[in-house]
Structures are given as structure tokens and as C-alpha cells.
């Protein structure tokens, strides 16, 4: 089969993995040296496809032949898709060619399970080894980790790759049993543990060989089963704490051709995925707890963002005086992001903050107005009940959902 | 009115500004660029000689910020910088901060310039030259790019880090830069032949990237608005995948939104695999 035809099949088979990040790698440079590739911690999106997602890496499967029969997956063994397999050398050739053209910043390689978990993992490692050792490739490498593979292989992968990821796939054991009978939550967590352990072993040892310097991530599919947002986010929180994960990706279940009856025929609203990303960002960047964001509710509201929802449910905290409040509290004002908080803190060292300053800072005042006090402004709506405020601030629900990418 | 020209060169502007500041000259009475000609009331007066009596002290960070903002191509390019400098030198540091009206414009320009450097790093596309031509021109990769601000000189070293000993050049409508594997050669005026090599390079190997772009797109998640937001239309022309965008959007709108698979894959013969791993 022609290389172009294989690439078509194996890129098509890989696109359901949401992650395409190339950030967080250590500083590496090829200036004046043999080989190719540099990283500096910043990710680069080299293109965007019409689904609005960034193209940062060459994201392909080594093969889409697979022994597993995961119901949500287009590559499951019972799926009627064309199959192909790259040789490791072909993946290397594509990576280097796209990299020289400045189309990508690295490789994200995954694979269907062929022969055995160990064999598959060995093949992935072989590609990374060829790139790093034969071609002195210093760009970004993300390898998918096969959960049942030998821990020694996972460790080997961790020394070659910037990032490893093990996909949780489905948020509960029961769903895994029903939809992915060959996978087990326990081995997925074990593999995450091996990676986390490898990271801890070199933490604080600048001379030790690097181990997944850009961290580990995972992906969970949203809407292939009935799991609610509360379970998803509490799960994510425990992964961030327990395994030091860098990112949890939420991938709205994408209907697949020739879909089995065990999974839904339609996609969940992309807005749900978007709200999960917003909530996840609040967990990682703003110090919120999953319990705070959801309370008793099972799902995040779709009509307002999770930060606004929290503010409406906690009116006693507001209005906050932006000239006095702690930065961590300022960051809890709807419509004011972390960057604006830094700028407000810099400005108030020089003088008192006025309402007009917040306009200059491009804060979303529509949202912030009821929750703030400045030197020349006090909200008239402070007395307004949360229900009325919510009605005023809710986003119009368009019939076509948007899917902003987080 | 004092009318100055700095040739869009920050080092020249800095010397001029230092001298103006030393003589306590108000920003309202000085202008850079050609626009003063249109001002009928402007009677050109010369720049006073010597350093002047006023010794301004400004934070070190300001100079770096002014230099970065100076790469912004737009109205009042150099006047704005002098206004900021003048206010900070006279004790009003808010002129540097985003909360202030002037400071907010300064910070916006710095952000735009940073964003444009990032666009360069992201959207430049090199075309590999065939071996014989590469040997003849001593050049492995060529690219043509149209940045909106003057970022080529300051932002191009990035490619020397990435491409090792490869020899490359980037041509633009204004300036150009070339790397011979060891040294960068920046030209404020891009040589005509550089531009020609970059714009006319044949690319028989482009097909692989286009195949990848087609297939990594998920038509079930069509969202052209988000694409446009991140990848402004002005870059499409110079991206090999640019012409594919409207085509893929069109296909997705006409019935390919049901699932994520590309049309070409659905048309091919599929292959189920037996539980024991045998083909079925």
C-alpha cells in the first residue's frame, strides 16, 4: 500500500484522541548540531482544521489492527474499517519530513493492540528510539502507553518521550466492563502509577536522565455512557492529586460509522465538553474543588459557565472590593481571568482602581459588574436575587452548539 | 513641530528620544514619519543639539517594552512610544500599565507583536529544495511569509534552534533572513532572488501533508468559526492546506457530519478481525 493511503487510514483512526499539546517539554536545541528539533516549553499550533482543533503534532496510529473490541472505538476488531500498518521507519520518515517543513512540532504515536500489549509497546518504543538515537530528533514525542505492558517497557518509553498518556476511556469500572471488556480500571491505574513513580524518582535530581518531562495525561470519553459531570470531575481531581497528571482531556463521544447498539448514535452537546474543560481549568489553575463547582448537582449548567455558577451560588462572598481583596479571591470574580488579576494587583500598587480601568483591562464587565466594588463604583444589582441575575447573564442557547477548544 | 524620521529603526529612535527628553520636549510638539506633511499647521523645527539638561531615569524594563512595541506597524508607531517614555520619565509609571489608556495601547501592541512572532513560528512553511538545486544555492529549505509586524529579525533564530545544520531562508514583502547552518544573515530589504526562490519553489512532496490534514479533521465536530479565530484568513494563502479548508467545510456541511470518518475511508473495503486475532 502507498504511504499516502496508509497515512490517510492511520490519521483517520487516530483523530478521536483529543490531545495535541506540545507544551511543557524542557529546553532542547539543535542549533549548530546534527539532527533536528527543539523544544522550549511553549507549544506551537501549526495549523487548525475546520473542526477548530489545533494541529501541533503528527497524530497517527502505528496500526489500526486491534485485538480489542471497545464498543466506542472505530478501530475495534468488529469494526468494518480499512486497516493499515506503518513500519517504524515510515513513521520516522513522516515525522522528520513534516517537522522540516514546519508543519508540526513533534509526534503523538498510538496503536491498536496487536499480538500482545508488550509487543505493541515495544513497537512504539522502537519508533521513539529511532527518532531520538538514529536521527538525533529533539522535537516533542508523546507516546500512548498500553496499560497491560510490562512496567519495564513503560519506564523505557518514559525516558524517550516528553509525555506518556494512559487513557481512562470510561469514567467508571462498570462502564469499562460493559463497553471495553478487555480493559480494566485497575491496570490503567497501575500504568499511571508506574509513570508517576518514574517521575518522582528523578524529581529534584537535575542530573538524572529525564523522565516524561512534559508529564502524563489521560483522556476520558464523555457521553458514551450515562456518567454525570460530578463523577467525571471528582475522578479528574483524584487523578491530578494521586498521579500528578498534567491534563485530563474530555472527548465528547464522536459517533462512529457502523456503530454498535451499545453506544449512543448521537454525540452529546459539544457545549457539555466545553463546560467540563472550563471546570477542569478552574480545578487546575484557580484552586477550586470539584465539590465546590458541583455541590449537589450531577451536571454542570450548560447556560452559564462554572465560575459564574459558583459566584451565583455564593453571593455572600460578593461584592468584592478590587482594591482590597486577596488575588486568589479576585480570581473568583466572573469575567476576570488570572492575567487580569495580575494586572490589577500591579495597578493598585500605583493607585486606586477605577471602573474605567477594568474596561481598559478588557475584563468581561457584563459578568463582573454585579460582583465588584471599585473606588468609583458599587453595584446596584448587589441586592438582586441570584435567580434574576442568572436569567440576565445566561448565554443564549443557539440551536447549533459551539465546541470551543480548551 | 519637530519632525523626525527614524527609518523604522529602534536604535535610531532611541537616540532621538533620549535627546528630546533631555531638552524636555513635549510629545505634542514632535512627530515621526511622513504624516506631518499633511499637517498644515506643522512648521518643521530642528531637533535641539546636545544631550540637554534633563536627566531622565526610567525603569530598565521600560526600554525592552518600548523596543518590542516598536515592532508594531501602525498609526503613531513611534509617537506613542515617546509619549509613554515622557510620562514615565516624569514620574507617571501608570503609562506602562494595562489599566491606563495609553499603557493599555502599549501593552496591546506588545501583545500583537508577540502574537505575530508566534504566527511566524507556527505558520511559516518551508519547502525542501531538490538536491541539485540545494547544492547550487547552498540552501535546503525556503519559505515565503507575510508578517503584519516587523518581527522577522527578532523572531527567526527560533528556526536555527529547530533545524540544526539545515540551510534555510525566509522571504517577506519587506525583509528577509537566511541561515547557512552557522550564521544568520538578516536583510532589511529582501534580495529579489531570495524572494523568487521562495515563491517559485516546486513541491512534489506536499501531498503527504495534505493527506494528513484531510484525515485528522473530524467532520462531525465542524466549527469553522474557531478555525478562523485561531488561523486568520490572511495566512491561508501561503499554507498548503489553505485551499482545502473551504472544500472540507463544504463536504462536512453536505452530509458528512454524522460521524467522524473521512469520505475516502468510508469508501474503502473494510476488514473485521476475529476474536482470536484472525481476519474475518
Image: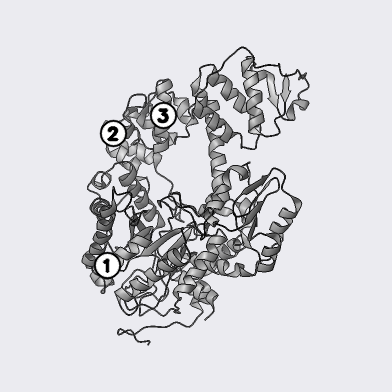
Do tag 1 and tag 2 residues touch (Cβ < 8 Å)? no
Residue sitting nearer the eye, B19 or A348: B19
Q: Which residue is mark 2?
A: A315
As drawn, the label of residue B144 is none
Q: Nearer the viewer, residue A98 or B116?
A: A98
Q: Chain of mark 3?
A: A
Residue B154 occupies quadrant: top right
Label 3–label 2 contact, CB within 8 A: no
What is the quadrant of residue B10 in the picture?
top right
Where does the image place residue A134, in percent across and percent down from the top left?
A: 46, 67
Residue at the (74%, 26%) spot, across then down? B36
Task: Answer whether residue A220 is visible to the viewer in this image.
Answer: no
* Dot placed on the residue nearer the N-terminal end, 3 or 2: 2
Image mark count: 3
Which residue in the structure is indicated by mark 3? A344
Quarter-of-image position of residue A383? top left
- Residue A231, how many percent across, how many down? 25, 55
Q: Is residue B153 left or right of residue A360?
A: right
- Do the residues at discs 1 and 2 belong to one chain? yes
Q: Is residue A144 left or right of residue B32?
A: left
Label 3 residue SS? helix
A189 vs B67, left or right, is: left
What whole-number distance in Å separates the C-alpha atoms at marks 3 and 1? 49 Å
Front label number (3 vs 1):
1
Q: Which circle marks residue A152 in the picture?
A: 1
In front: A14, or A154?
Answer: A154
Query: Callout 3: few (<14), some (14-19), or many (20+) C-alpha neighbours within 10 Å?
Result: many
In the figure, A249 relative to A387: above or below?
Answer: below
Amino acid at each position: 500500500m502507498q504511504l499516502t493511503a496508509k497515512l490517510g487510514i492511520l490519521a483517520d483512526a487516530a483523530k478521536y484522541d483529543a490531545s495535541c499539546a506540545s507544551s511543557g517539554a524542557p529546553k532542547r536545541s539543535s542549533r549548530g548540531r546534527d539532527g533536528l528539533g527543539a523544544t522550549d516549553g511553549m507549544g506551537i499550533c501549526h495549523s487548525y482544521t475546520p473542526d477548530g482543533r489545533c494541529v501541533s503534532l503528527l497524530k497517527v496510529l502505528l496500526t489500526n489492527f486491534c485485538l480489542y473490541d471497545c464498543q466506542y472505538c472505530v478501530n475495534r476488531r468488529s469494526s468494518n474499517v480499512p486497516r493499515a500498518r506503518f513500519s517504524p521507519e515510515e513513521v520516522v520518515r513522516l515525522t522528520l519530513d513534516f517537522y522540516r517543513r514546519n508543519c508540526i512540532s513533534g509526534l503523538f504515536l498510538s496503536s491498536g493492540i496487536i499480538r500482545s500489549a508488550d509487543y505493541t509497546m515495544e513497537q512504539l518504543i522502537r519508533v521513539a528510539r529511532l527518532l531520538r538515537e538514529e536521527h538525533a530528533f529533539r522535537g516533542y514525542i508523546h507516546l500512548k502507553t498500553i496499560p497491560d505492558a510490562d512496567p519495564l517497557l513503560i519506564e523505557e518509553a518514559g525516558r524517550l518521550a516528553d509525555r506518556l498518556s494512559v487513557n481512562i476511556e470510561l469514567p467508571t469500572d462498570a462502564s469499562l466492563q460493559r463497553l471495553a471488556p478487555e480493559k480494566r480500571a485497575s491496570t490503567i491505574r497501575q500504568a499511571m502509577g508506574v509513570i508517576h513513580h518514574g517521575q518522582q524518582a528523578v524529581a529534584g535530581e537535575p542530573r538524572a536522565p529525564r523522565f516524561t518531562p512534559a508529564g502524563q495525561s489521560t483522556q476520558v470519553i464523555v457521553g458514551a455512557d450515562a456518567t454525570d459531570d460530578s463523577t467525571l470531575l471528582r475522578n479528574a481531581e483524584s487523578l491530578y492529586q494521586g498521579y500528578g497528571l498534567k491534563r485530563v482531556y474530555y472527548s465528547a463521544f464522536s459517533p462512529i460509522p457502523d456503530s454498535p447498539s451499545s453506544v449512543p448514535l448521537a454525540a452529546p452537546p459539544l457545549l457539555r465538553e466545553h463546560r467540563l474543560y472550563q471546570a477542569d481549568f478552574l480545578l487546575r489553575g484557580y484552586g477550586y474543588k470539584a465539590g465546590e463547582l458541583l455541590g449537589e448537582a450531577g451536571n454542570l449548567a450548560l447556560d452559564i459557565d462554572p465560575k459564574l455558577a459558583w459566584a451565583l451560588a455564593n453571593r455572600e462572598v460578593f461584592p468584592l472590593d478590587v482594591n482590597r481583596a486577596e488575588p486568589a479571591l479576585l480570581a473568583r470574580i466572573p469575567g476576570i481571568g488570572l492575567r487580569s488579576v495580575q494586572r490589577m494587583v500591579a495597578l493598585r500598587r500605583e493607585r486606586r482602581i477605577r471602573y474605567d480601568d477594568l474596561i481598559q483591562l478588557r475584563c468581561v464587565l457584563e459578568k463582573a459588574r454585579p460582583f465588584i466594588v471599585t473606588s468609583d463604583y458599587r453595584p446596584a444589582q448587589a441586592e438582586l436575587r441570584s435567580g434574576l441575575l442568572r436569567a440576565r447573564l445566561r448565554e443564549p442557547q443557539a440551536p447549533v452548539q459551539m465546541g470551543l477548544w480548551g | 513641530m519637530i519632525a523626525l524620521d527614524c527609518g523604522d529603526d529602534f536604535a535610531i529612535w532611541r537616540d532621538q528620544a533620549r535627546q528630546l527628553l533631555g531638552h524636555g520636549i513635549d510629545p505634542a510638539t514632535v512627530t515621526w514619519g511622513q504624516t506631518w506633511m499633511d499637517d498644515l499647521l506643522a512648521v518643521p523645527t530642528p531637533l535641539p543639539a546636545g544631550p540637554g539638561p534633563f536627566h531622565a531615569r526610567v525603569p530598565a524594563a521600560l526600554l525592552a517594552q518600548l523596543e518590542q512595541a516598536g515592532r508594531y506597524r501602525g498609526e503613531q508607531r513611534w509617537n506613542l512610544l515617546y509619549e509613554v517614555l515622557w510620562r514615565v520619565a516624569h514620574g507617571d509609571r501608570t503609562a506602562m500599565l494595562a489599566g491606563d489608556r495609553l499603557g493599555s495601547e502599549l501593552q496591546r501592541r506588545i501583545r500583537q507583536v508577540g502574537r505575530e512572532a508566534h504566527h511566524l513560528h507556527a505558520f511559516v512553511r518551508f519547502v525542501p529544495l531538490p538536491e541539485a538545486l540545494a547544492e547550487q544555492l547552498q540552501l535546503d529549505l525556503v519559505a515565503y511569509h507575510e508578517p503584519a509586524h516587523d518581527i522577522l529579525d527578532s523572531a527567526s533564530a527560533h528556526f536555527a534552534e529547530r533545524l540544526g545544520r539545515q540551510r534555510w531562508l525566509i522571504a517577506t514583502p519587506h525583509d528577509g533572513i537566511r541561515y547557512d547552518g552557522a550564521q544568520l544573515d538578516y536583510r532589511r530589504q529582501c534580495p529579489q532572488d531570495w524572494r523568487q526562490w521562495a515563491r517559485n519553489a516546486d513541491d512534489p512532496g506536499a501531498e503527504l501533508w495534505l493527506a494528513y490534514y484531510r484525515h485528522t479533521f473530524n467532520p462531525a465536530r465542524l466549527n469553522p468559526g474557531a478555525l478562523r479565530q485561531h488561523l486568520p484568513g490572511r495566512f491561508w494563502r501561503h499554507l498548503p492546506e489553505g485551499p482545502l479548508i473551504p472544500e472540507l467545510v463544504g463536504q462536512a456541511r453536505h452530509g458528512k457530519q454524522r460521524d467522524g470518518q473521512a469520505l475516502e475511508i468510508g469508501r474503502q473495503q473494510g476488514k473485521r478481525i476475529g476474536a482470536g486475532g484472525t481476519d474475518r
